[in-house]
Image (cartoon, grey):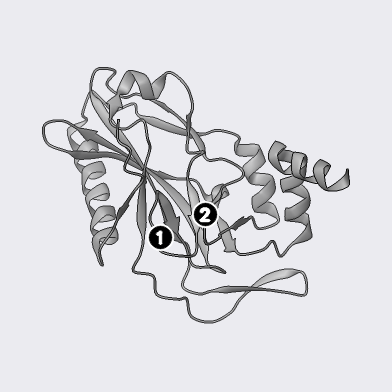
Amino acid sequence: MSDLGTLKLSDGTESRLLNVVESELQAGREKGDPTEKQLQIILEDAPLWQRFKEVTNEMIVTKNGRRMFPVLKVSVTGLDPNAMYSLLLDFVPTDGHRWKYVNGEWVPAGKPEVSSHSCVYIHPDSPNFGAHWMKAPISFSKVKLTNKLNGGGQIMLNSLHKYEPQVHIVRVGGSHRMVMNCSFPETQFIAVTAYQNEEITALKIKYNPFAKAFLDAKER
């Protein structure tokens, strides 16, 4: 299995990746590839993600990296059980500005910082058979978000910018090809160094067992 956590993308690589994805999907539609024609990626815990999105979700980024909550989990069906695939995750800016929290709401606040350090997280079970990926929900629980470029399997994001996670499935062995690229609008979040909205803090504590344990410890 791969223990390579992240793969740095050079300038322009991300847009080429997306172009490849689109052309592959178009080619697949035209050919009607019988193997992966019924491929589906479903977001787990979608109602929970939606609750966070309704109040604009925030994810902490730290120098040493912080894990996401909610945890991104997906279920996949329609892969070839005997073919090999790798699952990748990256984070795409959703708009052309940075944000600030003013008087209880998020508002646009000028031009975004230019980031040339976009990374792709490779799921540690990669590469693996389609049968493996389809047998249970796939969790990206080990992804860590950071605001410093320090490697170690971490994803660098700019604070006060909004992102949307994207899942990529790549068929490996023989000629590598992108099979599917999928994102879910309800998983969008603004990267922050500290929670800005008290409603988000309350939701994180309510639904995250680790946050609950932390709260209990503080109260003792």
> Which of these two is toward me, 206 or 210?
210
Question: Which quadrant holds the C terminus?
Answer: top right
Q: Quadrant of residue 86?
A: top left
Q: CA distance from mark 1 to mark 2?
A: 9 Å
Q: Quadrant of residue 173?
A: top left
> Which kind of residue does numbered mark 1 sit on?
Asn
Q: Earlier in the sequence, mark 1 or mark 2?
A: 2
Q: Residues within 10 Å of mark 1 (few under 14, many from 20)?
A: few
Where is residue 144? Give x, y as percent: 49, 49
Left or right: 96, with 186 as reference point: left
Q: Residue at x 52, y 62 (%)?
A: 63
Q: Quadrant of residue 41?
A: top left
Vertical placement of residue 184 versus 95, above or below = above
Left or right: 29, with 218 as reference point: left
Q: Residue at x 42, y 48 (%)?
A: 166
Vertical placement of residue 54 versus 46, above or below = below
- The residue to which callout 2 is attached is 65
Where is residue 2? Give x, y as percent: 30, 35
Asked if labels 2 and 1 touch by Cβ distance under 8 angstroms, the answer is yes
- The residue to which callout 1 is attached is 150
